Amino acid sequence: MPTIFTKIINREIPATIVYEDDLCIAFRDINPQAPTHVQLIPKKEIPRLVDGQPEDAALLGHLMLAAGKIARQLGVGDAFRLVVNNGADAGQSVFHLHLHILAGRPFGWPPG
Ligand code: AMP
């Protein structure tokens, strides 16, 4: 089921894109929760992390490597947090898998 993130991939709605390759795209969050807050998403429509399949293993690994590359590119490679909300009860509101890349302020533990 396409979401607003598919519209961003297809350039049907605007976004501040900070990274793109054949498999994924990253853009600034519209409601940032930290000085740096980027959404990193696969171009493939995977609704939730739990919906990933064995054939997505390389793609999921690619996302992790891309997250580090993007963090370095944005100057926050030494201190950032990755968050994946899986399911509405965990805070997921857009059902297209996304990695939140957050940086630029202290982060508490455990997370809220
Ligand atoms: P989640 O609650 O984990 O599903 O995260 C969804 C994230 O997408 C939230 O941080 C929203 O602020 C962000 N978001 C929703 N719509 C847009 C948009 N059009 N452009 C950028 N970020 C968005």
Image (cartoon, grey):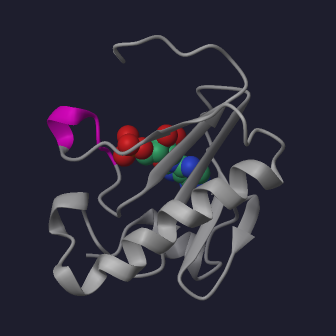
| Residue 80 x, y percent position in the rendering | 62, 34
Residue ID at (50%, 45%):
100
85 sits to left or right of 103 = left
Residue ID at (16%, 68%):
51
Q: From the viewer's perspective, is residue 53 above or below residue 22?
A: above
First to last magenta residue range: 88-93
| Residue 112 x, y percent position in the rendering | 34, 15
Residue ID at (21%, 71%):
52
Magenta stretch holds residue 56: no
Q: From the viewer's perspective, is residue 40 above or below residue 32?
A: below
Magenta stretch holds residue 89: yes
| Residue 61 x, y percent position in the rendering | 42, 70
Occupied quadrant, residue 93 = top left
| Residue 106 x, y percent position in the rendering | 63, 13
> Quick one: 37 or 10, which is closer to the camera?
37
96 sits to left or right of 26 = left
Q: From the viewer's perspective, is residue 110 above or below residue 37?
A: above
> Quick one: 59 or 10, which is closer to the camera?
59
Occupied quadrant, residue 57 = bottom left
